[in-house]
Image (spheres, rainbow, N blue to C red):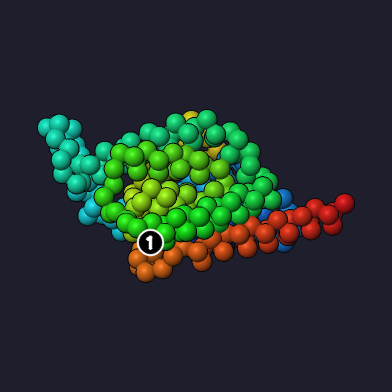
Amino acid sequence: MTILQAIILGIVQGLSEFLPISSSAHIVFTQNICAVLNGSTIDLGSAQQVFLSIMLHVGTLIAVLIYFRKEVLEITKDFFKALWTRDFSSANAKMGAFILIGTVFTVLVAYPLKDVSEKLMVYPQMVAFLLIMTGIVLFFSEFKSKHQKEHTDKLSLKHAILIGLAQGVAAFPGFSRSGWTIATGLFTGLDRVTSTKFSFLLVIPIILGTSIFYPMLEINPQELATFNWTAILIGTAVSAIVGYFCIKYFLKFVARFSMNFFAYYCIIAGLIVISFFTGIALGSN
């Protein structure tokens, strides 16, 4: 892995984590296409590649924490205060509870899917097919939202559970995490901005848990010394910077426009990737 590759992957991660276009799909596509163009193969399951993927997500976590720093501090403070006083009447305490509940339901769905989702990473055509499904889900959610008489900016327990479940399903590469969570919010009557903000906040505990516990359980400490740390850290920084600006401008976008543009993108990108790798496979036979 070179520094240039890490920068490219950092840009891809920073953009695609928050846009409803599946960061995992774009990381898989980018790595596989680079490998094909270079005439080489890439081991997506290698310790360094897995660790790089985790660190790129840490970069986007940093972006969320910086952008929503005031909200995160207030939610954390009021949530733990509510745990002590057993009074969850404040909006921030409720938000903290909803994030916790959503995370629990995410883990209940995502953990059993872990092995299957990791195996899919080496099949770009299948990932592309799931990306097309993401586009279809976005279309239907926008259609449902457009024809709904009223929208709400008030989260409820139902929203937290259903959006958490959607985030768990999005463990499959190609299923956009932000796409499925925002779409679920729209399906259940939330407005776009509220759905998007909750989607971004809900990713915080998931990335924290993954970045802390996965390396401890899955990566041999001796392997860490063999990693290209310069490339990894640069990729992480790029992911954080790009992710921050992506959050800023995407929130402005969803306040004014529908997500049909991203639905079209997911479908077209998925079809292009399927055609590309099918052509490569046929050409090698």
Q: Nearer the viewer, residue 136 or 35?
A: 136
Residue shown at 29% from the left, 43% from the top? 156
Instruction: State whether residue 131 appears in this view.
Output: no
How many marks can you see?
A: 1
Q: Residue 127 in the image: x percent, y percent?
A: 63, 49
Q: State which quarter of the image contains the N terminus.
A: bottom right
Q: Nearer the viewer, residue 215 or 57?
A: 57
* Residue 41 horizontal side relative to residue 57, left or right: right
Quarter occupied by residue 83: top left
Outermost residue, left direction?
Answer: 85
Q: Nearer the viewer, residue 224 or 43?
A: 43
Neighbourhood count class around disc 1 (C-alpha, 10 Å): few under 14, some 14–19, many 20 upward: many
Q: Secondary structure at mark 1?
A: helix
Residue on which the image places disc 1: 247
Tell me which amino acid carries mark 1.
Ile
Instruction: State whether residue 263 appears in this view.
Output: yes
Q: Residue 15 in the image: x percent, y percent?
A: 47, 61
Outermost residue, right direction?
Answer: 285
Measured along the vertical axis of the image, is residue 92 above or below residue 11? Answer: above
Q: Residue 257 in the image: x percent, y percent?
A: 41, 68
Q: Residue 183 in the image: x percent, y percent?
A: 44, 52
Residue shown at 35% from the left, 58% from the top? 149
Residue shown at 32% from the left, 56% from the top? 151
Quarter occupied by residue 88: top left
* Residue 159 horizontal side relative to residue 265, left or right: left
* Residue 120 horizontal side relative to residue 139, left or right: right
Measured along the vertical axis of the image, is residue 50 above or below residue 252? Answer: above
